[in-house]
Structures are given as structure tokens and as C-alpha cells.
Image (cartoon, rainbow, N blue to C red):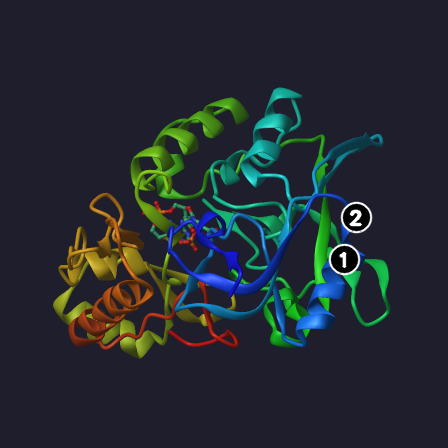
Amino acid sequence: MSFSLKPYNTFGLDVRARDGIVVRDFAMFPAAFDKIRKNGTGFITLGHGSDVLFKGDYDGTVIVNRLMGVEFNEDANTYYVKAQAGETFHDIVALTMKKGIYGLENLAMIPGTVGGAPVQNIGAYGVSLSDFCRYVEVLDLVTGKVDRIMGRDCGFGYRTSVFRTPENQARYIITAVELALPKDWKPETSYNALSSQNLETPEAIYDFVCSTRKIKLPDPKVLGNAGSFFRNPVVSRETLALIQKTFENVPHYPAESNPEMVKLAAGWLIDQAGCRGLNLGTAGTYRNQALVLVNYGGATPDDLVNAAKHVQTRVEDAFGVHLDPEVRIYGEKGECQL
Ligand code: NAP
């Protein structure tokens, strides 16, 4: 286990991989593939590691994607922004804002890289990457070629995409993403958090989202975390009615995937189950946002797994609802269950 993953996971866990390589240039990919072949194990690609929890050492090769660069193009109606996978997603949001190119303001300050963004179809305040993704550029390990997967073929759903499946994780390395941003900007302020603020310009939305997120999300350099740890659960109307018997004001929204179902706010459930600011010693949840699992300092992978399971149990006991992790969990052999 020669490759430390400590700098490459925002929980700051002291775990290792069998081998790893930081790819800063396309020309480094052949060396990366040689390592994978030589080791004869699987591989995973990481950006900032802001959406992963390692349950221990990983017996495979890690490719850290640090391809950098941004290109701007436009036609009569649209700006096209092509960013390399290693760029920090928020830097692209900030850069477009500075250039007067709007649309990404709701996605400000989501942790992670451009390459990680399509994998879970990042989203915030009613906007998702899929709203603007023209194509994802990939290195296809089956054909050995660089290919473009158009946005409509990416299987984007609620915090998911085709890039999450194990087959595609073993097949594609995301190298860049091109976004298409209409010149005719329309604000998306339907979420209460925004609609209650009278935000009329992209800059006002951007500033509000940045300041809100600074309060709600701990800086991983200070407190290790991976942003929202659990997905918002989607439940039947019968389950909602049962919960409403005790919790009349439970927040709920139509599920994007199925109008017959409802989406509950995982953070609210965790809070009501008494787990906001949970502190089990080295691991727990953040006091300003219950959805964020944190490393209070010196947590081991087991400490974080135990804290996550503790939250799951408390929510299940209180509401009969199971919370699934939104972050990807990796064990010795690759992606696995919590
Ligand atoms: P919040 O404003 O406290 O709202 C709690 C939850 O209610 C959110 O998760 C949101 O679902 C849902 N919600 C609120 N208003 C809604 C509406 N009008 N229609 C549908 N759903 C609504 O949320 P928060 O935890 O502070 O997060 C703010 C935003 O940042 C959310 O959109 C959240 O998804 C996003 N975020 C994204 C990531 C990521 O992409 N990994 C990480 C952290 C936070 P949704 O989550 O479906 O929007």
C-alpha cells in the first residue's frame, strides 16, 4: 500500500491505496494504464475526493485527475464553456460570473472537481449540472479513444448518472465537461431559501448562495467532511401520511423521478431525530447542517461508518425511513455498501 490517500479525501482519513498516480497531462495516461495493468487490480479515479468515504485501505490503483484548462466559445444564443476534469467546479462558476456568463450561480461552492460533477449530477437550489451539460468528454478504456457522451445520453437523474455504474467506472475516465449556457439568462429562484430573498440578478443569487453555504458547510481543511452525506429519501404518499400523523409540518416535495412519490429532506429528518451536532467522539454530524457527517479530528474509517449507521438507525426508529449515502463508499476491493 504505497500511495497515501490522505490528501485525496476531504474526510482527511489516513488511508492508503496499493498504488496511485496524479495525472496532470494527457500524456501521463499511458503510464497510468501501465500501473493498472502491472498491479492487475481495479482502479478508481478521484478529483478532490470530496464525495467519497474510504472504509479502509483500497487494494487497487488510484488515478488522481488534475487535468487543467478552460476554453470559452459562443454562438448567437449560447456560451460554451469547456473545462478540464481537474478544475475545481466552483472556480468555473466564479470565472463565468466574472465574464458575465450566467446560469451556474445556484451551483456556487459545491465542493469537488469538474470531473466529479457529472458523476452524481451535482445540483443545488433547483439547478443541476444536467441543465447545462452539453457533453462529457471521456477516455474510453474499451476503445482506447477519447469520446464525447452527449448530455442527453448521460442518464442524468437525481444526483446520479451513467457514470455511477461499476461497469462505466471501470470503462470511462472523465477528462472534460462542456457546458452550454444560454445568453438569455433566466433566474432559478423557486426554492424558498432564494424566493424569500428578492434576488433579481445573477450576482445577487451567487452572493447569497456563497454566504449561505459558508455557514452551512464546514471547510474540509478545518473539519473533514464530504458535504451532504445522505440522499434525500423518496417515499410513498402513504409513508408521508404516516409521518404527518406525528410531524404535521414535515417538509416534502414532489419527487423529480416519479410524481406519485415524495422527496423528504434528509437534513430535516436527521435534525428531528436528534442527530444535528451529534458527537460520538471523533465523528458525528455538523451543528449547522445535520446532513454533513464530520471528522472532528482523528476519526478512523470505522468511526465515520459507525456515526453514519447511528444516524441511519435513529432516523429509521423515528420515521421508518431508510437513508442511503449520497457519497460513494469504497472498501478494499472498490465501491461497496456502508
Ligand atoms: P435546504 O434549503 O435546507 O432544503 C432542504 C432540502 O429540501 C434540500 O435538500 C432540497 O432538496 C429540498 N428542497 C427545498 N426546497 C425545495 C423545493 N422548492 N423543491 C424541491 N426540493 C426542495 O437545503 P440545504 O441542505 O441547505 O442545501 C441547499 C441546496 O444545496 C440543496 O438544493 C442541496 O441539494 C444542495 N446541495 C447539493 C450538494 C451536492 O450536489 N452534492 C451538496 C450539498 C447541498 P434538493 O437537495 O433536491 O435540492
Q: Quadrant of the C terminus?
A: bottom left
Q: Which mark is residue 31?
A: 1
Residue 76 at x, y = what percent? 84, 30
Q: Residue at x 48, y 29 (%)?
A: 206
Q: Earlier in the sequence, mark 2 or mark 1?
A: 2
CA gap between label 2 and label 1 equals 10 Å
Report whether 302 appears left or right of 257.
left
Which residue was labeled with disc 2? Answer: 26
Going by the numbered disc 1, the residue's amino acid type is Ala
| Viewer can see residue 7 | yes
Q: Position of residue 141 (x, y in %)?
A: 78, 68
- Give neighbour class at mark 1: few <14, some 14-19, many 20+ (Cα, 10 Å): few
Respond yes or no on whether mark 2 lies under 8 Å from ligand 1.
no
Q: Residue furthest front?
A: 2
Observer-nearest residue: 237 or 109? 109
Label 2 SS:
helix
Q: Nearer the viewer, mark 2 or mark 1?
A: 1
